[in-house]
Image (spheres, coloured by chain):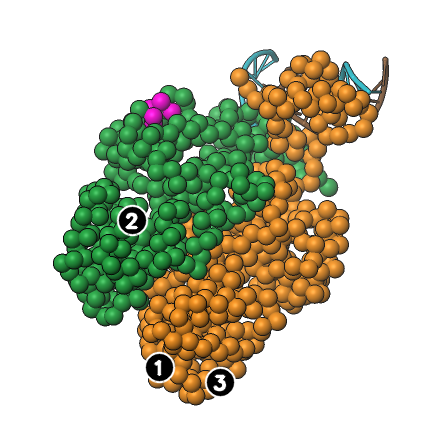
Chain colours: A orange, B green, C cyan, D brown
Amino acid sequence: MSKPGIREIARIANVSPGTVDRALHGRKGITEETRRRILAIAGSIGYSPDLAARALSTRRAPVLVGVSIPREIRYYFDQLLAGIMSEAGRFDRLGVKVLYSPMERLGQDDVQKASELLSRRVDALILTPGDPQALTPVIDEAESRGVRVICVDTDAPSSRRSTAVCVNPEVCGRLAAELLASYLPEGSGAAVITGMLEVEDHAKKTAGFQAMYVGNGGGAVQVIEAHEDEDEAFQKCFALLSRNPIAGIYVNTVNCLPVCRAIGAAGLAGKVKLITTDLFREMAVFFEKGVIAASIHGRPFAQGEIAVRLALDHLLNGRPLPRESLLMPHVVMRSNLRHFLDAMEPAAHRRSAAEAFGGRQL
Amino acid sequence: MSKPGIREIARIANVSPGTVDRALHGRKGITEETRRRILAIAGSIGYSPDLAARALSTRRAPVLVGVSIPREIRYYFDQLLAGIMSEAGRFDRLGVKVLYSPMERLGQDDVQKASELLSRRVDALILTPGDPQALTPVIDEAESRGVRVICVDTDAPSSRRSTAVCVNPEVCGRLAAELLASYLPEGSGAAVITGMLEVEDHAKKTAGFQAMYVGNGGGAVQVIEAHEDEDEAFQKCFALLSRNPIAGIYVNTVNCLPVCRAIGAAGLAGKVKLITTDLFREMAVFFEKGVIAASIHGRPFAQGEIAVRLALDHLLNGRPLPRESLLMPHVVMRSNLRHFLDAMEPAAHRRSAAEAFGGRQL
DNA sequence: CTGAAAGCGCTAACAA
DNA sequence: TTGTTAGCGCTTTCAG
């Protein structure tokens, strides 16, 4: 009682396998009527093609997934890449190959890298549009050639990209606000330190924070743009703390270390509550000191997995792509810090690939 | 310039494809010398097998994954099942089939259901051992027949099950404690309402809570076993609140509604901070009223996905199974409540399967 | 418009 | 010990 194949359909329809193939694939050279008949039979017996056989027969080039993401910041994009590779690796039996063409840092060379991958005839393109404006023509060009573009980590919403996989920025901001409010007396003043409000992600996180913070009985919220610059963040933060009665700070971006230092320099460690974003090793000590109360973690590994998963579900199984896929951030606190740090250990430190895999399951 | 195959090696070595096959797979019936020669050639030309062709040739029977999980509590196990089906569905083109044989509720009939699936010759068995003692012989029997057993949601640690996929219970307890402490003045008394301390999951969550709560400056912690009974939980909780200065409660199990009611009945809504476990629709109103401050969510959908993923990675790709896979719980607060509720909508309410899929990505 | 037949690269059963 | 051969399920070319 094996899975029905194309021959079985042919037998029932009393036609040849070739005709069934034509019907199934909408090829020309077949009557509309026989096509319908064959499709009906195929549907009714629950036919589904054997992909291995198809791959063998068409000796079709392997499914190529182009990946163009930054190399820096390592701790973050390493995890994104690991998620991509982990998921892609599950399908290498099916001929799925990844072409990895990283750029040095976000927004740098991305047009060139994407075009290059495109010319290498990839079937799907996973990328982090650091400069959405510049990249939009390339994305649109790719889509018009039938190459599905999946934005990951950051979106290019006005392009024709098929889908985007990001952490839900509004929820990040709201969670930060709700957590912060839980630490502070009602009406406490707070500050958001962000990168640039022109960046959609930064703006949404900030807006989410503001909405939730005041809604939760918090006081005034000051917003500071630090442009991802360490010195600027330190200066502005230190100045802020010496002028204003700030009880809590939410750092929107990865640029939290200077803020930690500024809090320390102002002698407010543990006094001012700090909520940060993502996680890297240097932050651990500030958790232990009680400077960082919690961090809203963007789950880059999961983002990578999901991006590949969506691409392959579409390419291999014909599933439609959602417009976007927003994932829930994790909350990192002292309780679970160790687990997040462990999960970003390089795989080499683990006893086996399986363990590396298992260990990633956050 | 196509990829060299087994015939190419045969041509170079001046032997037949059959011999190359024997050499490559360490089969018997070949001289050690010719084997070495062939392996050398294979290595030097960078041979790698065409897996599609191999799969086609070896025509394995469909991969059967047996699933035996409870039907009740619906909200929870529906999501677990949805995760299982979603992940399995991605592989049905590869001949993966799920045999679903649910029991009415946890620990009921599980031996019978598991044995039944075993006799249906499944390749892997995913189950929730509600009664680990009773199930251990069946699990061991399965494993000795080469059927990989994957415990999900709850473990049978003294059996020979291949792996277990659970939420990390200790982290659940610790997170609850840390969150609770953030709401309360130092030294506040707290209570844990659990099911039965003989259940490993309940014990570990309780222990995690206690360790973290006192470590975080909390006061005394009272532990109450409510045996998953609504009335018992209400009575005990109400009595507790009237006798003791309790500032926060952590409910370890799904049995939180009577606790919410008891808090209300004691006139302490919003005054006593409550941390719960998981999420179902009836809880939403208590979030909105401020009775529930947060809930530690066990991510049943993700657990189901991961269980299937591990099984198939092992079965199809030969990846080793980790001893266990503990996942990080999510923290549900007012900030993100809506997203969790949306994700548990039945798929029928959504516009398309893709959206249902995308929407699950928490 | 439809049928027949030749592979795709590999495995496995049977011959030599 | 080694060679030969017949498929696995599908696509594709060439006849009819």
Look at the image and tell me whether residue B171 can be seen: no
- Chain letter for mark 3: A
- Front of the two marks 2 and 3: 2
- Residue count near mark 2 (Cα–Cα under 10 Å), binned few <14, some 14–19, many ≥20: many
Horizontal placement of B306 versus B58: left or right?
left
A319 within the magenta span? no
List the residue tagged with mark 2: B256
Residue B115 within the segment the image draws in magenta:
yes
Percent x, y of residue A306: 54, 49
Q: Position of residue B27 (x, y in %)?
A: 49, 27
Number of the label disc, if any, that sits on residue A235: 3
Q: Tell us which disc is closer to us: 2 or 1.
A: 2
Q: Is residue B213 left or right of residue A176?
A: left
**Rendered image quadrant of residue B294:** bottom left
Horizontal side, residue A208 vs residue A21: left or right: left
Is label 1 in a helix, a strand or a loop? loop
Residue drawn at point x = 46 percent, y = 40 percent:
B83
Residue range in magenta is B113-117
Identified by mark 3, the residue type is Gln
Residue B153 screen position, x and y as percent: 34, 42
Q: SS class of the residue under badge 3?
A: helix
Pick the front one: A31 or B239: B239
Q: Are marks 2 and 1 on the same chain?
A: no
Whole-number angstrom distance, CA of label 1 to CA of label 3? 15 Å
Q: In this view of the protein, which residue sits in the foreground, A80 or B127? A: B127
Q: Which residue is mark 1?
A: A268
Q: Main secondary structure of the magenta part?
A: helix
Q: Residue at x 31, y 53 (%)?
A: B276
**Same chain, marks 2 and 3?**
no
Q: Are marks 2 and 1 in contact (CB under 8 Å)?
A: no
Mark 1 is surrounded, within 10 Å at the Cα level, by few (under 14), some (14 to 19) or many (20 or more) other residues, namely some
